Amino acid sequence: MADLLIELFSEEIPARMQAKASDDLKRMMTSAFKEAGLTFDEAEAFATPRRLALSVTGLPTTTPDISEERRGPRADAPEQAIAGFLRGAGVARQDLVEREDKKGTFLYAVIEQKGRATAEVVAEALAQTIRNFPWPKSQRWGAGNLKWVRPLHSILCVFEGETVEMEVDGIHARARTHGHRFMAPGSYAVENFADYKQRLLDHKVILDPSRRQTLIHDTAQTLASAAGLELVEDAGLLAEVAGLVEWPVPMIGSFDANFLAVPEEVLQLTMKKDQKYFVTRDRATGKLANKFIFTANIEPSDDGSAVTGGNERVLAARLADAQFFCEQDLKGKLEDNLPALEDIVFHKDLGTVAERVERIRKLAVHLAPIVGCDPKDADRAAQLCKADLVSGMVYEFPEVQGVMGRYYALEQGESNAVADAIRDHYGPLGPNDECPSTPVSVAVALAEKLDTLIGFFGIDQKPTGSKDPFALRRAALGVIRLITENNIRLDLSDLFDRKTGLLEFFGDRLKVQQRDKGVRHDLIDAVFAKGDDDLVRILNRVSALSAFLESDDGTNLLAGYKRAANILKIEEKKDGKAYDQAVDVDGLGADEAKTLSGALAKAKEAAENALISEDFEAAMAALSTLRAPIDAFFDKVKVNDNDAAVRANRLALLSEIRSAVNTVADFSLIEG
């Protein structure tokens, strides 16, 4: 067994692409090995800003020999058919053997294929991988034809301690790599993965991204703690910074405390988005501190003051810009921005943002009593919810839309409820985002998302396949969370035309959302089929139905229902008519049939009454009383009686079973 080491060395790879790229390199190469019949012990992939690396251990030095027996035509087949088989199998006529079976005498070819050197497989697989690598974006350079994310400089490929002979676009594989761009820029030879990893470390490159992350995080925490501060955790930023440096050197800097007057969200965004800095908090107050932590990609030759000073000056300029925009915006009122919304087109078929705001206002006022808030507050919050879009701050930092609106609203004297609703109306943005819960916020957030859905479905711009350019699936999931997490009793179809297909769209999104919580999609279908569109009531009914079907009564009732429905379906199709007439109890004949008829009437009435009061457990309990009489009916009674009138009456009884059980949900849609 032998080990393989690969490195693809290039100009800087964007941090956001590195993790997937290393996974793709591993996937593509190991898939090629498996296809060639090669086994291996372990494969590990790594990425730094300038290299992708792969280590594979325990590879055999050759692929296995293959012996394949291929069946051909009959021995007495036409010569043309036999010749075609010979060409396909790559053998001569004398190499074929004849074998008899029940269908006659057939020709067989035994194809022996000797194993290949693993190095040949590696060379072919790596060349193919490089040429077909799935970068999100790639480029050509110079006179070559190769496309790579950034110019590819060298290929390292060592198997069993020897360089694998291969070439891609004029780049020949070698057993050499390069150190840190600034601190150890030269190239040097390596023998294997252990040697490669250690020599990279000696040349100021930490290969493992998880180790770089740990080093950055731990050092940043130490620096913050030494300053009496607390590091603000940010896993996404940590991963990104680790992808920007090969030799991370975290350092701490500061900025003028006067900038702390700028809204906290803007300070964080400025430091994170533009500069990739970590922010800190004062342990005592919980407020942001005027200290930040940055990560250099080089060990400073002095005490670090020059590097720190440079970063402080750059950040000061950025914060000064943010402060300027904030001060300029505060010279006027938020509502002064409203006329400018008339000049912004939301969508060519849905009008301007100003027109959209008016629609949101009407919806918010309509929803206000339903969610339990003052309609005037809902109207005011909806009126101002998009006003910060034309502010200088949001123009420069779009990520703080809503957040800045809240600050500006409070500054001009709006209530906390109105200001919070301006900030919250975009939420929830995803499954892990906090869902608005205060009444005014819920009213405006619902109105904003419903306007989006009603508008785009109204102009037939629905999501298709994987395409959802207007994020309508996210909007629907947001509506579902707002309604269900706040227990809002709302009939959705009162807000839109059922013909648009929007209600079915909500049903599909509800199944997706509940699937992650372990709720069966068929139960949602079964309840949704009853025409209900109150999401809270639907989920309560689904919960009760799920618990019922997990019981013995529920399992057996479902089986009895399906048996009745299947018999009824077959007989109705055969007779060409429906047996939905009223049951003549005296004409049923068997006592078990009469008992079942009485039980059905009682259970259906009890279930309907329970549904009216939304006592779904009681509705399921009513259905559970049907288990015994249905079991007894099928055990003792022949449905297709020789007497045509009795048969028709008993088939009508089966229709009654279907109708009674379907009172709670459409059991025909339940699997099992």
Image (spheres, rainbow, N blue to C red):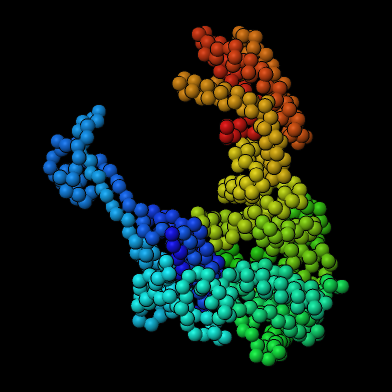
Which of the two residues, 159 or 205, is positioned nearer the viewer here?
159
| In this rendering, position of residue 456 left or right of residue 289 | left
Q: Residue at x 66, y 17 (%)?
A: 629
Which of the two residues, 379 or 540, is positioned nearer the viewer here?
540
Position above or below: 512 against 303: above
Q: Residue at x 59, y 26 (%)?
A: 559
Q: Residue furthest left?
A: 79
Q: Residue at x 68, y 79 (%)?
A: 250
Which of the two residues, 655 or 512, is positioned nearer the viewer here?
512
Q: Residue at x 39, y 53 (%)?
A: 37
Location of residue 618 in the rendering, given as x and y in whole percent from the top left corner: 76, 30
Location of residue 330 in the rendering, given as x and y in whole percent from the top left corner: 77, 80
Which of the two residues, 329 or 29, is positioned nearer the viewer here?
29
Q: Residue furthest right?
A: 284
Image quarter for residue 79? Answer: top left
Position above or below: 164 against 630: below
The N terminus - image quarter = bottom left
| In this rendering, position of residue 231 left or right of residue 26 | right
Location of residue 91 in the rendering, given as x and y in whole percent from the top left corner: 20, 49
The C terminus - image quarter = top right
Location of residue 169 in the rendering, given as x and y in whole percent from the top left corner: 35, 75
